[in-house]
């Protein structure tokens, strides 16, 4: 049991209830409608009080980075070592972060993520899996994909998929275009994403299954998701700040910190992503947190590992996007907390009575400089190194208990 809390004079931001100035109460680790006797008073002095971030699709558990970024729950990708395709591995992953961090494992849809034989999803669900996923790969065999969707539907789980047709991408590290040609990098056409999304959406619609495309990054991909939503397909999609703020020009000078999966796209696709954010096509804003040390990044571009350390910078970059795009903060925290929680089927991401007392106190005006050498996480491989930003977490509470 945790001591009751009384957050006084806060700018409360709730995706379900909008924004208001006032007080918030936490009793027995849950949001309460009224203050409990003897509650500890925390004077917020007008700072933003918001739900803890639910980061969907992280590649590694990095507690220091999550704490610094205001992340209280994560959806862990299945491509771990070993792969999350056995109940014992799933159960261990679900428990290792508590009580400070709740890890919601995304179980592998196929054994070893090989895309050929279905994994034991039902047993993995009973061990704590909150969704099933294809990891960083796409299931090329449509028959296998259809069976995965049927199985996930019967279990009431969402399938989280990576959308790139491997037959087109091969060993590519960049999107085909002027930048890749000038740098002489192996590249693949952006249509590889749309082809994968089109096939997956058709199968999901036919199976009446729930599907989440972890990252959509192209105009054609957004058009497909938009049209599917109009037809009533149970589809959601996500994106990282990198694909909203950077185009493939960021790869110039062979900057391996800008080597991501999926790769950065053209400026036209980046603008299409911003439009999809504005019109509600994008449901989830995630960090894509994938920390990589110098041994994996200080290599020739084509030999380096893709991925970025995004957990600590997610909130500040998201706040910047909200300011620039005119997004209300309650809508922003739907993208950061409520919607990813819904994909995972967990009751979190809101500040309504009965919800978990996972809250973060944010100074949205606080300026700081993203410095890859000074980040708290296990690695600082961020494409935003040297960027001035605003907004940082002052205090973080998990289940009503403050994390140091």
Image: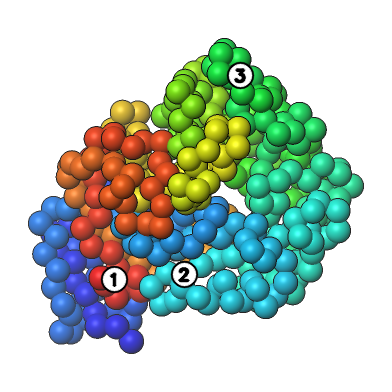
Q: Which residue is mark 2?
A: 102
Task: From the viewer's side, name the closer residue of 208 and 272.
Answer: 272
> Mark 1, mark 3: which one is toward the viewer?
3
Look at 33% across and 81% down and name the residue there. 28
Q: Which residue is mark 3?
A: 184
Secondary structure found at label 3: loop
Query: What distance separates the C-alpha of mark 1 from that of mark 3?
Result: 47 Å
Q: Which residue is mark 1?
A: 403
- Give left or right: position of 231 versus 379: right
Query: What distance separates the C-alpha of mark 3 from that of mark 2?
Result: 43 Å
Please provide percent x and percent y for residue 249.
Answer: 47, 20
- Give left or right: position of 3 versus 305: left
- Give left or right: position of 137 versus 355: right
Please provide percent x and percent y for residue 227.
Answer: 66, 29
Image quarter hosting the N terminus: bottom left
Classify 10 Å Cα crowding around label 1: few (below 14), some (14-19), many (20 and above). some
Reading the chain from its start, which is encountered first: label 3 or label 2?
Answer: 2
Look at 62% across and 61% down and name the residue there. 80
Reading the chain from its start, which is encountered first: label 2 or label 1?
Answer: 2
The residue sitting at the right extreme is: 143
Please provide percent x and percent y for residue 17.
Answer: 34, 53
Reading the chain from its start, which is encountered first: label 1 or label 3?
Answer: 3
Colouring chosen for the image of the structure: rainbow
Classify 10 Å Cα crowding around label 2: few (below 14), some (14-19), many (20 and above). some
Secondary structure found at label 2: strand
């Amino acid at each position: 049991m945790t001591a009751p809390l009384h957050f006084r004079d806060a700018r409360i931001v709730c995706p379900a209830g909008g924004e208001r100035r006032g007080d918030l109460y936490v009793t027995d680790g849950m949001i309460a409608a009224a203050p409990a006797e003897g509650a500890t008073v925390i004077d917020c002095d007008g700072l933003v009080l918001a739900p803890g971030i639910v980061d969907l699709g992280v590649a590694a558990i990095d507690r220091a980075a999550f704490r610094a970024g205001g992340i209280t729950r994560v959806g862990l990708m299945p491509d771990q070592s070993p792969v999350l395709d056995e109940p014992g591995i799933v159960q261990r992953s679900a428990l290792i972060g508590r009580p400070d961090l709740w890890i919601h494992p995304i179980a592998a849809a196929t054994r070893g993520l090989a895309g050929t034989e279905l994994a034991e999803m039902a047993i993995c669900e009973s061990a704590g899996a909150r969704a099933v996923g294809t990891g960083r790969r796409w299931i090329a065999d449509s028959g296998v994909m259809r069976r995965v969707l049927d199985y996930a539907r019967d279990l009431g789980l969402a399938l989280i998929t990576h959308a790139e047709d491997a037959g087109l991408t091969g060993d590519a590290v960049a999107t085909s275009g002027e930048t890749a040609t000038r740098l002489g990098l192996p590249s693949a056409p952006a249509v590889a994403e749309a082809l994968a999304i089109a096939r997956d959406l058709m199968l999901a619609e036919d199976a009446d299954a729930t599907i989440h495309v972890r990252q959509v990054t192209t105009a054609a991909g957004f058009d497909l998701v938009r049209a599917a939503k109009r037809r009533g397909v149970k589809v959601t999609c996500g994106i990282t700040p990198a694909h909203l703020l950077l185009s493939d020009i960021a790869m110039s000078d062979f900057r391996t910190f800008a080597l991501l999966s999926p790769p950065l796209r053209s400026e036209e696709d980046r603008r299409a992503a911003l439009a999809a954010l504005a019109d509600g096509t994008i449901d989830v804003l995630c960090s894509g947190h994938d920390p990589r040390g110098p041994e994996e990044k200080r290599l020739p571009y084509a030999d380096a590992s893709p991925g970025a350390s995004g957990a600590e910078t997610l909130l500040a970059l998201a706040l910047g996007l909200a300011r620039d795009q005119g997004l209300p903060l309650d809508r922003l925290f739907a993208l950061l907390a409520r919607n990813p929680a819904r994909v995972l089927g967990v009751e979190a991401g809101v500040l309504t009575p009965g919800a978990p007392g996972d809250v973060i106190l944010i100074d949205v005006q606080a300026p700081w400089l993203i410095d890859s050498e000074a980040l708290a996480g296990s690695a600082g491989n961020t494409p935003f190194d040297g960027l001035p930003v605003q907004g940082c977490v002052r205090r973080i509470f998990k289940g009503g208990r403050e994390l140091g």
